[in-house]
Image: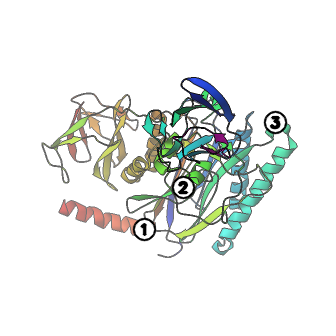
């Protein structure tokens, strides 16, 4: 598989949910450049909305402006871009009293040849479906996660915690930010899901896995089903999903598809 | 601020605000909540405050503790919970939780630093869903009138999960989706849209009625509500 052979199919969907009037989430996906970003804003007086959009615009601007050489892109580049985005939001918050304390989570995925770089701040998540199995690739910056990790709380008791929506850090709320970045190799057929907590708070991982694995050949329908199930389960928060499906070389896929269809017919 | 109200035989003895991260309860006078009760261990139980949660734990005491009538090990306190220790009772009062309508809103909490580097990705723990999620989905079954493997004609397929697909991914596929208001049929992929009772449906999900006959993806299926 050469670096040119990977193709991405992308889709995104954001919904204010069934309770909130305002959608403070934001999302961007880019098939050509191979990235996906979700943000979930917080702060009163519409400041959360401002923070999530500002974060998205800033990071997407940087991704689009970067030199096209894949070698330029690294975990450090991603970390620097997010730190810079933090400063942009923090400065904006300082300039206006109504925006003091505004912040946003961020989860992003960017492809570099056959590698995927994942980064996040806060409790927005990245999952990967590989060989029918869903895996959470990020560790929430949330007090609930800390409680469970430190053994303060049994994982099965976490569902009744009052701390569900407390993130331990966000973009824009302080001068410093600790960005989580990692990199993993990409396989053909991988499906990546980036989501805000409006999805994973209400839809279990077994259902997320089932929906993506069953419907991944129609990504918009997959996104629609995920958001719909969160809404059917209460829709207490804004719900945002971005999906990226990794495909092989198009001509190869077509060839295999044609043969596969032929043999599929013969053997069924 | 949340507090614990100590009572004995139905009479209030004292109030204790949960104003520090770790509160100890026991027979010793050095405890944050000293309780002069011979049935208690010198240090009997603790309450640890973390964000909005107060977590109560019995510290392997000799006579144990109970919460709302059940043996206590360690658990999150809820407004009006009653902890029984010896002959005494502690009632948990949390005005904030009782009145807060904003619990679902994401907020930032300032915490002391976690041990270790923030960039070290520790093992990922699956935190379960919020307990408020209670989902009731419409039920149904599908009778396979005709079709190919893995199904056989005459087979009845219960719609157990939220989605059930029929067909071959990459070729022709339909999905039956359980929702609270009913079961819906959607076209996933394939050059032809499904037919319901010999009428072709479009891109939009189609709500199924009892005894609807679906023709799609090489299958003929009858929906049983």
Measured as percent of width and height from the top left, residue A133 is found at: 40, 59
Quadrant of the snapshot with the C terminus of chain B: top left
Q: Residues within 10 Å of mark 2 (few under 14, many from 20)?
A: few
Other-residue count near label 3 (Cα within 10 Å), few / some / many at <14 / 14–19 / ≥20: some
Q: Which residues are magenta?
A: B23-41
Q: Position of residue A170 (x, y in %)?
A: 70, 50
Q: Chain of mark 1?
A: A
Determine the secondary structure under disc 3: helix
Please tell me the numbered disc located at residue A98.
3
Q: Quadrant of residue B54?
A: top right
Residue A251: numbered disc:
1
Q: Position of residue B6 (x, y in %)?
A: 61, 31
Question: Looking at the rendered structure, which numbered label has been put on residue B183?
Answer: none
Nearer-N-terminus badge (1/3):
3
Identify the residue at the far top of this view.
B11
Q: Position of residue B129 (x, y in %)?
A: 48, 43
Identify which residue, A43 or A18, lies in the foreground: A43
**What's the residue at 56%, 53% (across, down)?**
A125
């Amino acid at each position: 598989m050469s670096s040119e052979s990977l193709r991405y199919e992308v889709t995104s969907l954001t919904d204010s949910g069934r309770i909130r009037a305002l959608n403070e989430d934001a999302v961007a996906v880019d098939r050509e450049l191979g990235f996906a970003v979700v943000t979930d804003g917080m702060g009163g007086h519409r400041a959360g909305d401002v923070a999530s959009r500002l974060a998205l615009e800033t990071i997407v601007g940087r991704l689009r402006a970067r030199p096209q050489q894949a070698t330029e892109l690294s975990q450090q580049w991603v970390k620097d871009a997010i730190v810079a985005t933090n400063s942009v939001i923090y400065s904006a918050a300082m300039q206006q009293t109504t925006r003091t304390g505004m912040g946003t989570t961020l989860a992003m995925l960017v492809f570099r040849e056959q590698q995927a770089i994942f980064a996040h701040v806060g409790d927005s998540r990245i999952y990967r479906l590989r060989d029918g199995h869903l895996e959470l690739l990020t560790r929430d910056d949330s007090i609930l996660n800390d409680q469970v990790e430190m053994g303060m709380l049994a994982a099965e008791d976490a569902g009744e915690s009052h701390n569900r929506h407390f993130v331990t850090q966000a973009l824009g709320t302080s001068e410093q930010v600790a960005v989580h970045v990692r990199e993993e190799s990409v396989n053909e057929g991988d499906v990546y899901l980036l989501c805000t907590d409006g999805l994973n708070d209400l839809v279990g991982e077994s259902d997320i896995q089932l929906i993506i694995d069953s419907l991944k050949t129609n990504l918009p329908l997959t996104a629609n089903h995920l958001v719909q199930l969160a809404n059917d389960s209460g829709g207490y928060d804004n719900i945002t999903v971005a999906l990226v499906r990794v495909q092989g070389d198009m001509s190869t896929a077509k060839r295999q598809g044609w043969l596969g269809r032929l043999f599929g017919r013969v053997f069924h | 601020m949340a507090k614990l109200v100590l009572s004995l035989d139905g009479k209030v003895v004292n109030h204790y605000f949960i104003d520090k991260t770790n509160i100890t309860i026991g027979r010793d006078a050095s405890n944050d909540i000293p309780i002069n009760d011979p049935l208690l261990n010198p240090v009997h139980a603790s309450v640890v405050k973390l964000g909005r949660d107060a977590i109560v734990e019995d510290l392997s005491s000799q006579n144990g503790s109970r919460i709302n009538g059940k043996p206590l090990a360690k658990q999150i306190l809820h407004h009006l919970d009653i902890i029984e220790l010896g002959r005494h009772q502690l009632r948990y009062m949390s005005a904030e939780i009782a009145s807060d309508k904003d619990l679902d809103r994401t907020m930032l909490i300032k915490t002391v630093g976690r041990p270790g580097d923030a960039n070290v990705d520790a093992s990922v723990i699956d935190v379960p869903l919020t307990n408020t999620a209670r989902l009731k989905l419409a039920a149904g079954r599908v009778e396979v009138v005709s079709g190919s493997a893995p199904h056989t004609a005459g087979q009845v397929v219960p719609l157990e999960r939220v989605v059930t697909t029929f067909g071959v991914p990459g070729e022709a596929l339909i999905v039956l989706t359980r929702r609270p208001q009913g079961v819906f049929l959607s076209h996933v992929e394939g050059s032809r849209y499904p037919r319901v009772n010999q009428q072709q449906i479009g891109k939009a999900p189609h709500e199924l009625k009892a005894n609807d006959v679906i023709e799609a993806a090489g299958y003929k299926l009858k929906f049983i509500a």
